[in-house]
Image (tube, grey):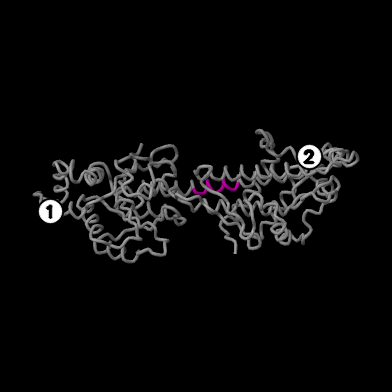
Amino acid sequence: MTEPLRIAIVGHTNAGKTSLLRTLTRQVDFGEVSDRPGTTRHAEAIDLRLDGSAAVRFIDTPGLEDSVALLEYLGTLEAESRPERVRAFLRGPEARESFEQEAKVLRALIEQADAAMVVIDTREPVLPKYRAEIEILTWCAKPIMPVLNFVRYLNTRRDDWHQMLLESNLHARVEFDVVAPFIGSERQLYGDLATLLPARRQQLQQIVEALALEARDRRLAACRVVASGLIDVAAMRRALPAEEFADELKQQRFVRAFQDDVRRHARRAVDDLLAVFAFRPDDAELAEIPQLAGRWEDDLFNPELLKEAGKRLGMGAMIGAGLGAVADVALAGLSLGAASALGATIGGAVSGGWKPLWRKLDNRLSGVQELTVEAPVLLLLTDHLLALARALEQRGHAALDKLRVSASGAGADDGLHRLVDALDAARGHPEWERAGGKGAADSDRQALEAALARQLAERFERVPA
């Protein structure tokens, strides 16, 4: 088995070293991330595992704190070469006293690592202490890859840092924002590292290829999550007996309970998406729609948003006007009444046998009312979940604030109406709704889920206008 590549993560205190490792390894709980300086006090190893094996062993190190004084001290030591001066320092008393933190960094680099990634906060001015840090690191005679962090900020001094690195004879570098990394920057990081480690080029190329496969698999898994959640909601069907339908309060409870079930399916899809991208359940939330009150799950039933979604679907403003709707019952995005859903479900009922169709006819004759979800709700839910999946793909695992995703109604991907049309197949199969682990094993449901996931994958990269 090939030994893992050993990379020391070094740099000034609070530059984002632990944050980089969280993002590269997708381990959101690794180490401690804080705005306080000097959070990491000891060297700690963490592996990037690909196909079950450790491909890269990272060594997270403390921040360099007094590089100017250390560089001056190293210059006083007698040795044949600069690396020998570093080793002499590590053997001496200063490594255990005045420069204890710096000694931990240099020992990890010179004794344990094949190369180093030096993390740079590009928002900082290029001060003498940073120049001293770079010079000390080069004395270890190990390949150095500068990683420019926070390059998306308005106050970044990226150009100044580029010039400083050139003056330090460090020509290979990579820009990598640990909170919101650019798509493909992770693979570029390893690809560029191969120029510094030619003997490990093949191993690094294998890492790049494995990461590309993992990224593709995550995207496909996310599309399956969205597709599965949409099928759950499209298949929802709740019946209310005639005597309860005549009671206005029971009608209202009936509708509210149905909406709550829709929200639960939506929340389950959000949690599953977070898990696909290795985030915790509370790490993200879809933001409130501008100018509208309430959480995004409530906005699935907002009449104004549904009206816009209905227009995109060619339905005009006829939302929530199904047969059987009664005054004072909020039916935005829902259809109430067996007759209103009968025509739309005949095809699905026949394909699944005559029993579902017979049940519909029996319900209609006995006065039983059924509640289902209209297409605009499915379109809004698709917009929301797809926006979240896109945002999570570009989300680093070091962010301290909760991800807020804005989902737009009118400006979203109008090609999704074909996907919503495909969900009609689920309307005649209420047994496809997952509840208590049931429903997901149906082969026809799985086939629809796979087809919808393929459609979503085709549209994943298309950003709404």
Magenta extent: 215-223
Name the amino acid, label 2.
Gly
Q: Which residue is mark 1?
A: 75
The kind of secondary structure element at disc 2 is: loop
Q: Which residue is mark 2?
A: 352
User: What is the magenta segment's predominant secondary structure?
Assistant: helix
Quadrant that contains the C terminus: bottom right
Query: Most extreme residue toward the right, as rendered?
Result: 365
Structural distance between the alpha carbons of marks 2 and 1 = 83 Å
**Labels 2 and 1: the sequence-earlier one:** 1
285, 57: nearer the viewer: 285
In the image, residue 270 lies at what x, y percent? 59, 45
Instruction: Residue at 22%, 52% (x, y): give it.
Output: 66
**221 part of magenta stretch:** yes
42, 10: nearer the viewer: 42
176, 113: nearer the viewer: 176
Measured along the vertical axis of the image, is residue 275 above or below residue 420?
above
Local crowd at mark 2 within 10 Å, few (<14), some, or many (≥20)? Answer: some
